[in-house]
Image (cartoon, coloured by chain):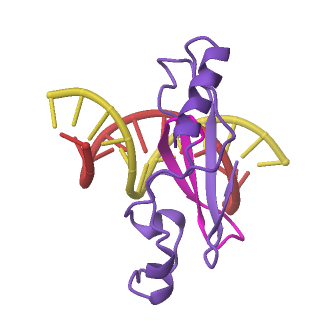
Chain colours: A purple, B yellow, C red
Amino acid sequence: MFDSTLSILRSSNLNGSHRTPTNDLRFINDWDAKKPEDFGERSKSTTTSLNTKIGWKKKSLIDDGYAWRKYGQKVILNSKYQRNYYRCSYKFEQRCQATKQVQMIDDELPKYKIT
DNA sequence: TTAATTTGACCCCC
DNA sequence: GGGGGTCAAATTAA
């Protein structure tokens, strides 16, 4: 976490007051309780040994240096899971135009595609 | 009471 | 018309 903080600070210095994303994916934010259906789960059950073992209910994803705010969720054709849409929390304050898409593609691992 | 999330509506493009 | 991306009112969380 210390390294991660340094990494964020360094990237900020390179670019004035704007935060830039770090590609350091070693640190993971709070993977705390959140409704599993947010990620397109089919079954409502959260009591299966698989689900509790993995602990895959999550609110915030990988900390990439940005603060993301969810603004949409869609069912995607030919995909078991829904796609979640995020934009930068400071879209207006910091002119941050970035958006991000997160979609679970495998629940056994679990595995997500983040665009 | 403010900020974030949820979710149906809306828009654009093929 | 349907799929995917975004908006925004209602709802929920802090």
**Image height check: is A17 above or below A89?**
above
User: Splitting the image into 4 quarters, where does residue C9 fall?
Assistant: top left
Which residue, as the protein is rendered here, is positioned at the far top? Answer: A16
Residue at the image point whose x is 39% and y is 60% from the top = A32
| Residue A63 vs residue A92, the one in the foreground | A63
Mark count: 0
**Residue A62 x %, y %:** 57, 50
User: Splitting the image into 4 quarters, where does residue A45 fall?
Assistant: bottom left
| Residue B4 vs residue A23, the one in the foreground | A23
Which residue, as the protein is rendered here, is positioned at the far front? Answer: A2
Q: Give the range drawn in magenta.
A: A64-87
| Left or right of residue B11: residue A77 | right
**Image height check: is A5 above or below A96?**
below
Residue at the image point whose x is 39% and y is 66% from the top = A35
**Residue B8 x %, y %:** 42, 56
| Residue A31 vs residue C11, the one in the foreground | A31
**Image height check: is A92 above or below A39?**
above
| Left or right of residue A35: residue A91 | right
Residue at the image point whose x is 52% and y is 38% from the top = A2
Q: Does the magenta stretch include residue A75?
A: yes
Residue at the image point whose x is 63% and y is 79% from the top = A108
Q: Does the magenta stretch include residue A62?
A: no
**Residue A21 x %, y %:** 64, 32
User: Splitting the image into 4 quarters, where does residue A10 fall?
Assistant: top right
**Residue A50 x %, y %:** 51, 85
**Image height check: is A93 above or below B7?**
above
